[in-house]
Amino acid sequence: MLKTRSKVIVEAHRHAGVFVGRGKEDLLLTKNLTPGESVYGEKRISISNTATGVNGEDAPATTTEYRVWNPFRSKLAAAILGGVDDIYIKPGSKVLYLGAASGTSVSHVADIVGPEGTVYAVEFSHRSGRDLINMATHRTNVIPIVEDARHPLKYRMLLPMVDVIFADVAQPDQARIVGYNASQFLKVGGGVLISIKANCIDSTAAPEAVFAAEVQKLRELGIKPKEQLTLEPFERDHAIVAGIYQRSS
Amino acid sequence: MSVDYLLHESPVGYAVFKVIHQPDTIGNRLKEVQAAVQDLDKFGKTVELVGLSPFQGTQDALQEINDISEGIMSDFLRATLETNLPKAGKKKSIVLGVSEKNLAGSIRAAFPNLSCETGETNQVVADLLRGLRMHREKLVKKVQPGDMDRSILGLGHAYSRSKVKFNVNKHDNHII
């Protein structure tokens, strides 16, 4: 807990639900949904709200707690710092998160969507899934789904239609996985964000060629690519592709 | 091939819908057709709820989701289909739209004069099932707003906990 850092000033980021802490160095922040708790040992910043109440009386002192979001640990944070135009994820969104791992990034996405939104977090690994379930017990807007994202029909009972799909599955057939999930659960006009690790698709081809091929695959699946962004300097040979699900051809 | 009925597996129960207005098979890749599925006013005229069989509590729902994810027709689903689908005569068979092909196979085995179409075999069925998922809270009037979300939360935890081999109460300590 950073108690002595009173100099940090929190500003809203261009993306709703994301914040920036201005201090000795700038930090990416999300508003902690469970104040007083860290999920993976990340630092927290408390800002006291000094708004005066009605009739000039002193309002009860309240604090807002933010959690520091590390771009080296989260592809989405890296994309935001890289200047991605639209993350589609905003307060109130329903997000299908494929490749949730232990739920560290998921917890920040849960902070962004807030209590009105929901994150449906799919992870196939049992060990990561256990940590994901534990994280979700404290955050009721996260639905843990320990299941294979290749078979979305297995978890169809747990999903409504969603606004956004975020995918970080690092599989050779990830475009197909995302397209299949989108055809089941993503609204027409919904956002798609895919993290592509060139090595995981084809370790022999040039990363640029891999990214271009993946973008082409997405087009064929009814996803209109809007933007491609490298994740340098946080990740090597990674790109985030953002797009809109159109379904119609 | 036209589809007469649709099965939707929701977290609160099984719902059977009747297709009252057959959508066109031609042009379902058009933007306008996709937009019509998203619009409740238009989609509400296409389908009609025949019946909803709610699950009796969490244990029940967990049993059903385990069967559904493996493509097995449970006795409860069988009873639901028996009560909500009309008895097919010898001449005319009924076409039921189902989400997944293994479940379709199980259903067909139990109901000989029922034929099944899935989202993979029939684009119209895929779009109709998407529409049901989109508008189910409005179409199933018995369900209170928020009930679906609460059921999903409970069921998601129950399902995932039953899947994980490890003791879920143990934590891994993260080292940064």
Image (cartoon, coloured by chain):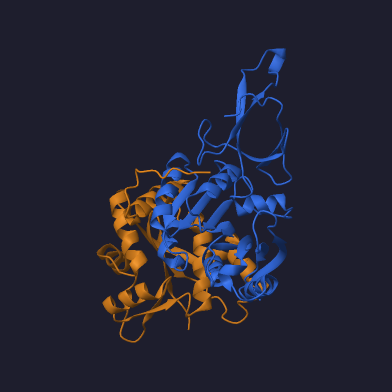
Chain colours: A blue, B orange
User: Is residue B164 positioned above or below A148 on the image?
Assistant: above
x and y, in percent, of residue A186 in the image? 57, 62
Q: How many marks?
A: 0
As drawn, is A81 to the left or to the right of A92? right
As drawn, is A212 to the left or to the right of B80? right
Which residue appears at 34% of the width and 57% of the height? Answer: B163
User: Is residue B44 positioned above or below A2 on the image?
Assistant: below
Query: Which residue is nearer to you in this view: B44 or A56?
Result: A56
Residue B22 seen in the current view? no
**The N terminus of chain A: image quadrant:** top right
Query: Residue lying farthest bottom?
Result: B91
Query: Residue lying farthest left?
Result: B75
Query: Which residue is nearer to you in this view: A239 or B76?
Result: A239
User: Is residue A127 positioned above or below B69 on the image?
Assistant: above
Query: Which residue is nearer to you in this view: B130 or B79?
Result: B130
x and y, in percent, of residue B101 in the image? 39, 76
Residue A236 seen in the current view? yes
